[in-house]
Amino acid sequence: MTSILADMYFWVKALHVMAVITWMAGLFYLPRLFVYHAEQVQTGSSTDSLFQTMEAKLLRVIMNPAMIATWLFGLMLVFTPGIVDWSMVWPWTKAASVIVMTWFHMWLGGRRKDFAAGQNILTGRRYRMMNELPTLLMIVIVLSVFIKF
């Protein structure tokens, strides 16, 4: 199995990067949709229905598959011999950041359900602040992987 992973390394790495880009795009865009939804849309209106459709499709059709692919290809890279040295700090900071990013993804899913139920209580300002989390996590992950401290 490990020799197969080694032979497929560049393909798996490329697929991992594509999945991460797609996931990150969703993690940036969904909270921005929530900002506009919270600030400018009346609950029960046709615009509310439109926003709910966009948010649900973004999460289900793009973000969830991208997150799963990111994890799948990432774990394949982890199990490829010679790629990860767990005695260093960087794989731990990356792993912790990916776990927090996954938590954020799930948190966004919960907020989407709040909008769908007409029970959103968060302000656009709060969604703007939360929208900074994926950026901070991305910085930690990219520096961890490239600097390998």
Image (tube, grey):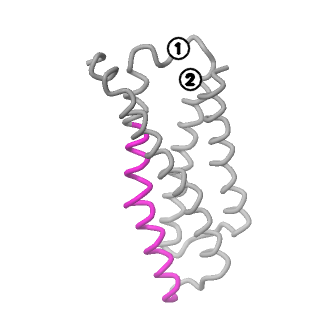
Classed neighbour count for the residue bearing mark 2: other residues with Cα under 10 Å, few (<14), some (14–19), many (≥20) = some
Q: Which image quarter holds the N terminus?
A: top left
The percent coordinates of residue 102 (x first, y second) are: 51, 43
Inspect the magenta stretch and tell me whether residue 123 lies in it.
no
Amino acid tagged 1: Asp
| Placement of 136 over or under 11, stated as above or below | below
> Which mark is drawn over residue 25?
none
Is residue 51 left or right of 64 when viewed as pictured? right
Q: Which residue is at a point 38% across and 21% down the rendered structure image?
A: 79
Q: Regarding mark 1 in the picture, which secondary structure is present there?
A: loop
Q: Which image quarter holds the C terminus?
A: top right
Inspect the magenta stretch and tell me whether residue 55 lies in it.
yes
The percent coordinates of residue 106 (x first, y second) are: 50, 51
Is residue 81 left or right of 117 when viewed as pictured? left
The percent coordinates of residue 58 (x first, y second) are: 45, 64
Residue under label 1, please give it: 85
Pick whichever of labels 2 and 1 is earlier in the sequence.
1
Amino acid tagged 2: Pro
Q: Regarding mark 2 in the picture, which secondary structure is present there?
A: helix
Q: Which residue is at a point 56% across and 43% down the rendered structure image?
A: 101
Q: Give the residue furthest to the top.
A: 87
Determine whether label 2 and label 1 are within 8 Å by CB: yes
The percent coordinates of residue 53 (x first, y second) are: 43, 74
Q: Which residue is at a point 49% across and 44% down the rendered structure image?
A: 20
Is residue 12 left or right of 98 when viewed as pictured? left
Asked which quadrant contains residue 137, the reply is: top right
Q: Which residues are magenta?
A: 45-71
Residue under label 2, please give it: 91
Asked which quadrant contains residue 31, the reply is: bottom right
Q: Which of 16 and 118 lies nearest the eye of the viewer?
A: 16
Q: Which of 138 and 131 lies nearest the eye of the viewer?
A: 138
| Placement of 111 over or under 135, stated as above or below | below
